[in-house]
Amino acid sequence: MTDQAFPTAPRRSRNVPLSKIALRWGLYLILCVFALYYLMPLFVMLTTSLKSIEEIRSGSLVALPRDITFDAWATAWSGACTGIQCEGLRPYFWNSVLIAVPAVILSTGIGALNGYVVAQWRFRGANLFFSLMLFGCFIPFQVVLLPMARVLGLMGIAGTIPGLIFVHVIYGIGFTTLFFRNYYVSIPSELVKAAKVDGAGFFRILWSIFLPLSLPIIVVTVIWQFTQIWNDFLFGVSFSQAGTQPVTVALNNIVNSTTGIKEYNVDMAAAIIAALPTLLVYVVAGKYFIRGLTAGSVKG
Amino acid sequence: MAPILDIKNLYKSYGATEILKDINVAIEPGDFLVLVGPSGCGKSTLLNCIAGLEPISGGSIDIGGQDMTDVSPKDRNIAMVFQSYALYPTMTVAKNITFGMKVRGVDQATQAAKLAEVSAQLQIEPLLNRRPGQLSGGQRQRVAMGRALVRDPKLFLFDEPLSNLDAKLRVEMRTEIKKLHQNLGASMVYVTHDQIEAMTLATKIVVMKDGIIQQIGTPSEIYNHPENLFVADFMGSPAMNLIPARTQKKDGGTQIEIASATGKPLLLTDTTHRNLPDDVIIGLRPEDIAEAGYRSGQNVQTAHCMIDVVEPAGADTFVVSHLGGKEVTARLHAETTACAGQPLEFAFDLGKVSYFEPNTGERLN
Ligand SMILES: Nc1ncnc2c1ncn2[C@@H]1O[C@H](COP(=O)(O)OP(=O)(O)OP(=O)(O)O)[C@@H](O)[C@H]1O
Ligand SMILES: [Mg+2]
């Protein structure tokens, strides 16, 4: 539009002063340096995991591997020792999946329901309710450890995977409610009114009108929750027992419990395996994540 | 017959602010009630209260003889068109229109038939597979109408349903609504800012200001007998001329004295005997002031006035002059020879005059 409004205005890209170009390139340079700095550890991890233990000991840390070998990955996946057992990460990886998937689905679902109620069905005390929910987001993990252990014990699910799912769902609800509430307040309340006149009830309106609008915020919530739950260590180590530990705890055990020579390549491979799902989620859905974070502020 | 909608002593406040104050309205089956009033006077709020979408703070609402005060919107048997359209953004136009029927479990065949009928009526057949985001404002408005028309409710509530249409479409839709009203005998409550819409559609007009009803009446009552200065000024375009004047009894009639720009007061004699205070405001519609010789009647008086502005408007020519410190508009025939800066002899039809008390604004005759 503006281009057409001022057809005689000089094109931006021409006649740009030299100092501006220098500034631009300087900026790129700095950004590249930072990018390299952040990519360096990943690079070292990746190359180290592909080296044999002899090569690690003889060569430099940043050198590329001479003979690429996937032995370390295989060991990390199914042979590395976590204490007395030597089954690798595999069983714990599945534990994490079994914890994260239901916990993400449940906490996202409950968050959507809560957000919908707080944003569109304003009841007496809705603001107080929401403030308390928000407060829940900022309670440090450590504070809830003991009460939570007691509750899990009373419920008879201490040390089990359902117990860990329960913990993560409870702790996640504050955040998921916040996300959905902020997304839903920007939806005009006339939509609910129109649907009410059309005869739809509470759940019908949520299902037919709000959820179809919610893809961006669902993606944001799922990424956030998945990352939180997958990467969690404290709850995992506190509320699990042998056989129900998540992958983060197992990774710690592999790295810390190796007797004799330290197998850096196996440690690195294990760390990458443990981090892979969250990386994958970002790669697949990161685009929607950015979009979802800025959505809601723009009226659809 | 029992009124289809009966509102008694309705109050509505948001927190400490009272929005609607002591509203009393009843409409008979088949009535077309038009709500008018300045922006922010509470028209949409009143519709929301009738629909049950906002809780009321006092009074009662009956629909079809049943007390609806605590009944949920879906059980009130109403259909509503919202000012902001409120179309469901993720559904196609067709789904938007049939959603209400789907929720109520109407069978597929009936849904399809109703959809076809309504979309033909509203000329939206080519749009049925689009989403609301892909429609223009006027198209959205018609879809919103469609969503209400597919239902067969006791009462229709329309909140400015035609405000975004172009002039031609608006006239067409107005006729459609009028037909709909006549054919279905449906009862309607209709909010509009458009004077012509109000006058042509209504069987009853309610004029509101600051949440208080100023007058309820037929279009002709509202137009010809406004109850107070607010209604007189609000209804009609161009507005009624409201001119400060002094009156005194004379020869069994009333002499009206209006200050004029020339210094010499303008004297008119209303032949009807009236009991009026000395100071009044007289109200005369522009069409009740004509060029001398074009209006006759026993209570028509002529007088010369200086013309300030001449505004030809096609069928009529509006002429503005200055009387009693106010601009006075007269609606003359199109071929008038009046020209600005020259005097013209006007015919004032005092059979149509309204008198108002200057302080309270209440009608005196
Ligand atoms: N949810 C609300 N909370 C507080 N005040 C409100 C609320 N909704 C409306 N109001 C106020 O109530 C008054 C009446 O609003 P309403 O929407 O009924 O006006 P309206 O007559 O429909 O105006 P318009 O012609 O502009 O649509 C306004 O002063 C408005 O600010
Ligand atoms: Mg309104």
Image (tube, helix red, strand yellow):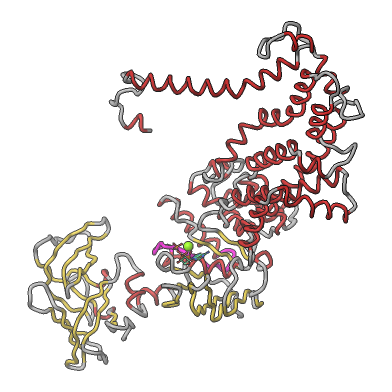
Q: Does residue B185 appear anywhere in the picture?
A: no
Image quarter of the C terminus of chain A: top right
Which residue corresponds to the image point at 26% horizontal and 69% vertical from the top-left? B286
- Residue furthest to the top in view is A66
Which of the two residues, B18 or B281, is positioned nearer the viewer here? Answer: B18
Quarter of the image where one finds residue A114: bottom right
Quarter holding the N terminus of chain A is: top left
Using the image, determine if residue A288 lies above or below residue B280: above
B257 lies left or right of B175 = left
Q: Which residues are magenta?
A: B182-197
Residue A82, located in which quarter of the rendered image? top right
Q: Nearer the viewer, residue B193 or A152?
A: A152
Where in the figure is residue B146, as x and y percent of width and height? 58, 53
The image position of residue B86, as x and y in percent, is: 56, 53
Question: Residue at the spot x=65%, y=47% of the render?
Answer: B95
When the figure is inspected, residue A94 is found, relative to residue B245, above or below; the finding is above
Is B186 a magenta residue? Answer: yes
Q: Position of residue B105 (x, y in %)?
A: 75, 56
Left or right position of A167 against B49: right
**Of A11 and B176, the residue lying toward us:** A11
Q: Horizontal and vertical percent for residue A228? A: 71, 39
Q: Is residue B195 magenta?
A: yes
Is B199 displayed left or right of B315 in the figure? right
Q: Is residue B340 visible?
A: yes
